[in-house]
Image: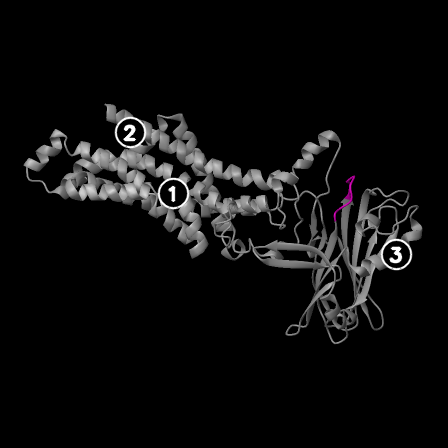
Amino acid sequence: MVNRIILILKSYKGGILGVSLLLFLVIITFYTIINIPASERSEWNNPSYWINYPKNAAPYWTNYFMELFNQKLPEHKIFTMNDAIVRNYSEGTDYKIENSTFIYDYDFETFPPAFSIPYSIQVGDIPPAVEISVKRPDGLVFVIYYNSLESLSNGLDDTNGANEQDEIQSNGEILIESQNPTVKDDVSTNVVSQRLFSSSREITEALSDYTNLFDFSTNGLPAEKIIFSDTKSNVPLQGKYEFIFSLYSFDDNTDLKDILWIVEGKVFGVLGTDDFRRDISFGILIGTPVALLIGVTVAITSTIIGLFYGLISGYKGGRTGGFMVIIIDIFLSVPTMVLFIILSLNYGKSILFLIGLFILFGWPGLALINRTFSVQIKNYPYVEASKLMGESDFRIVIRHIVPQLIPFTLANFALSVPAAILGEAALSFLGFGDPSFPTWGQMLQDAHFSSAEILGYWWWIIPPGLMISITSMAFILIGRSLESKAKFDKRR
């Protein structure tokens, strides 16, 4: 049977293309399952997981096209602790200084949208102090932050009432980025974690000491437009920047556990990011197994039901067959999309529930086709001869009728997969899908909700739409090839 299917597909160029596209989807599926742990796949709707990513950033490769027009957007950079070019120590009589220096070669003609500095420090008996400075390409050094962790811990309650800089909302969850530093103190391990934003009051106040260095007024300018600005005019100063993070410790138990230096940009990743800072390529990857699971599960189950239901109703005939046809007609007359929306509103938006609905209303069409063929085949002379020879109905069905129905059944199976995927995508786009699962339809719904098509965020719309089209095209081409061969064999 497998060899026969392969020969059929080879006879039709569309079938070869369909198999190639299907192989592409299978490779993505296995890559996702093997390389992305389930714990990470479940973080799609967790805003805090994506806080280090930029908001609405275009794919990084768009800069290659923009360079043709002498333009280039700032790239999003995430410098980790291992990226520190210089890490040195200096000691005094009763203190120790640990410096971590990050180098950033800024060659863009626009300012970065913002920057942030999250870090974690193991605190000893005496609270340490933190100093952050920036050495610019023109040699100027700005100390943009200095504070002790003791004062931060005492002012922790004040940070909770800080003004909001940004909100990341996803399925009812809101993450607020404060204009003041956010501090988390883990008492059990004595580790203090802080995230300092470029809009923090401390940085703004520190930069006010350098206003006399600029030939223009810096009042009201955000920190990034001062730090990265030329002193003559408010345009980006290109060149090498050194970001220096200094930890002043006064005992041997204080240690810098982790630090990131994040300079936000307008391009990032292979497919960019969305309004919730999520990586679009990550959503495409983890959405592929979900799409194939929905399509294949619905197709297999509905095809098996449709095959044997239609076969039995056609072979039996009489009142039994007539009653079974009435059931088929009832299912075919139901406006399924409207019913799906009503049931989703009243019984939840579980993906398993949606799969069950697709199966429940996915088999009648195939059952009606198989019934028609079964009525014809059971009247063939060789089938009548088998009856006269005393063969049982079960043996006749398995030997003479099912083999005749297999080609059309396989074709309908291939066509049922994209139907289920498109159905789920349509429901998700309308807001009736399961928000806990990252599906391509859900991505399109989020894009529409955020007005991505109006704001020009094409990278948020095209990839999931293209993946839906590729998946549908793969199974449609395979199904058409099998169907064409089946019709040819039927005429013979």
Q: Which residues are magenta?
A: 106-113
- Identify the image quadrant of the C terminus: top left
Q: Secondary structure at mark 2?
A: helix
- Residue under label 2, please give it: 486
Sequence-earlier tag: 2 or 1: 1
* Quarter where residue 97 is shown: bottom right
Residue type at mark 1: give it. Pro
- Vertical order, 197 against 372 (above or below): below
Q: Within 10 Å of the Cα at label 3, are there few (<14), some (14-19), or many (20+) other Cα atoms?
A: some
- Residue under label 3, please give it: 208
> Could you tell whether 28 is left or right of 370 in the image?
right
Magenta span dominant secondary structure = loop
* Quarter where residue 396 is shown: top left
> Could you tell whether 42 is left or right of 311 in the image?
right
Of the two numbered discs 2 and 1 in the rendering, the one whose residue sits closer to the viewer:
1
Residue type at mark 2: give it. Ala
Residue type at mark 3: give it. Ser
